[in-house]
Amino acid sequence: MDDLDRQILTILRRDARTPYTEIADSVGTSEGTVRNRVESLVDEGVIERFTVATRTGNVKAMIEVGVDVSVDTHDISERVAEWQEVDFVWQVSGEEDVVFVVDAQDTERVNEIITQTRELEEVVSTKTRLILDERVG
């Protein structure tokens, strides 16, 4: 990945719907070059998916989960990622093992998701943080 790829990624991170012609104008190359670069970044797995960021008026929260040392964090991450309100799931280092972000209709639903998480037999602890503000970098 070179500097041109990084410039293209910066633009796509802010708005994945930016037309290739507009990206090409911004980075000083042709639309075909941008198209080829994006296709290569997808093929190489650098771009995993194109997604939508929303401002729904819902309550967003980050739930940090500690699991037993014998637990496969990939397995629990896959299961949690299937929950309707879950936007992102990360396996992380540190005190917690898995972190996920939920976008729920209200704090009552956030609490239900926390309870659902705690009911998983592998989970030994949770810590929740409400997200007060969000910016796309």
Image (tube, helix red, strand yellow):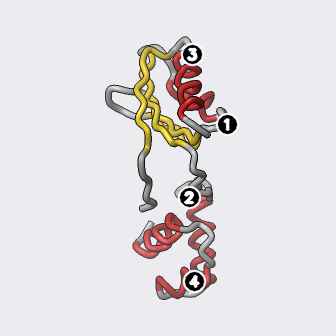
Viewer-nearest of discs 3 and 1: 1
Identity of the amino acid at label 3?
A: Leu
In the rendered structure, find residue 22 and report the number of the disc placed on it. Answer: 4
Q: Which residue is mark 3?
A: 120
Q: Earlier in the sequence, mark 3 or mark 1?
A: 1
Q: Residue 63: horizontal and vertical position, in percent? A: 46, 32
Cβ atoms under marks 1 and 2 closer than 8 Å: no
Give the mark nearest the N terminus, 1 or 2. 2
Is label 1 or label 4 in front?
1
Mark 1 or 2, which is nearer the eye?
Answer: 1
Q: Are marks 1 and 4 in contact (CB under 8 Å)?
A: no
Q: Residue at x 51, y 42 (%)?
A: 60
N-term mark: 4 or 2: 4
The answer to which of marks 4 and 3 sits earlier in the sequence is 4
Do callouts 4 and 2 mark residues in contact (Cβ within 8 Å)? no
Amino acid on which disc 4 is placed: Glu
Mark 2 is on which residue type?
Answer: Ile
* Residue 95, position as x, y percentages in the image: 33, 26
Q: What residue do we see at 49% from left, 72% from top?
A: 11
Q: Is residue 83 above or below residue 47?
A: above
Mark 3 residue crowding within 10 angstroms, few (<14) / some (14–19) / many (20+)? few
State the CA–CA distance, disc 3 to disc 2.
31 Å
Q: Counting residues from the N terminus, which is met first, the one under dot 1 or under dot 4?
A: 4
Q: Could you give the CA–CA distance between mark 3 and mark 1, rounded to whole angstroms? A: 16 Å
Callout 1 environment at 10 Å: few (<14), some (14 to 19), or many (20+)?
few
Q: Position of residue 70 (x, y in %)?
A: 46, 14
